[in-house]
Amino acid sequence: MSLDYAAMLRVALDEARQGLEEGGIPIGAALFRADGTLLGAGHNRRVQENDPSVHAETDAFRKAGRQPNYRDTIMVTTLAPCWYCSGLVRQFKIGTVVVGESRTFAGGVQWLRDNGVTVIDLDDPEGAALMENFIRDHPALWNEDIGEA
Ligand SMILES: [Zn+2]
């Protein structure tokens, strides 16, 4: 069985665009079962909720509700996960992370790979353009999100 990672990424990209429309940071994510069933999707809502803990990955993770185990789940995110979200992947032993792109932000991709997580980087130009435009227009908001001064 082969999964359509591009179709899975589109779910996350729709979330990212929704976040941008809401005035937030355009990062989306979705958690899937190994067979491609969607468990939950979400987007960064730091600005909308005034909550720095709502990253795209944590939002998708919470929307998916409790799962008996995460080894066979796939976290799909439009942008390479930050340290906080990479920690979530390790904590719950999510087996696979599909990254839309890691050009604008490398995050914890190498650390995840070094620790046995399968990381698939689709290097998607649409998500990269979303982030490049956002970072250009709102550098302070982006730096706040990733904990940079
Ligand atoms: Zn994060």
Image: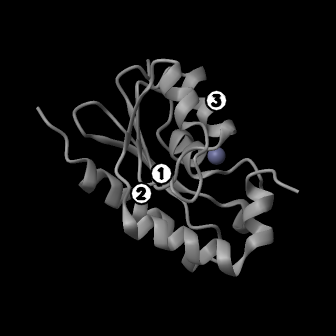
Image position of 110 with respect to 45: above or below: above
Name the amino acid, label 1. Ala
Task: Report which residue position mark 2 lands on.
Answer: 12
* Disc 1 + disc 2, Cβ < 8 Å: yes
Q: In the rendered view, does 36 fall on the left or right side of 54?
A: left
* Mark toward the viewer: 1 or 3: 3
* Disc 3 + disc 2, Cβ < 8 Å: no
Name the amino acid, label 2. Ala
Q: Position of residue 56 (x, y in %)?
A: 57, 52
Q: Residue at x 51, y 46 (%)?
A: 60
As measured in the structure, the alpha-carbon distance from the residue carrying label 1 to the one carrying label 3 is 15 Å
Q: In the rendered view, does 87 fall on the left or right side of 53?
A: left
The disc label shown at residue 10, or none:
none
Name the amino acid, label 3. Gly
**Of all residues shown, which one is farthest toward the right?**
149
As measured in the structure, the alpha-carbon distance from the residue carrying label 1 to the one carrying label 2 is 4 Å
The disc label shown at residue 29, or none:
1
The disc label shown at residue 87, or none:
3
Q: Is mark 2 within 8 Å of ligand 1?
A: no
Q: Quadrant of the C terminus?
A: bottom right
SS state under label 1: strand
**Lower sequence index among marks 3 and 2:** 2
Q: Is mark 1 within 8 Å of ligand 1?
A: no
Q: Position of residue 94 (x, y in %)?
A: 46, 26
Task: Estimate how packed mark 3 is, as few (under 14), some (14 to 19) or many (20 or more) residues with alpha carbons within 10 Å.
Answer: some
Q: Residue at x 26, y 47 (%)?
A: 5
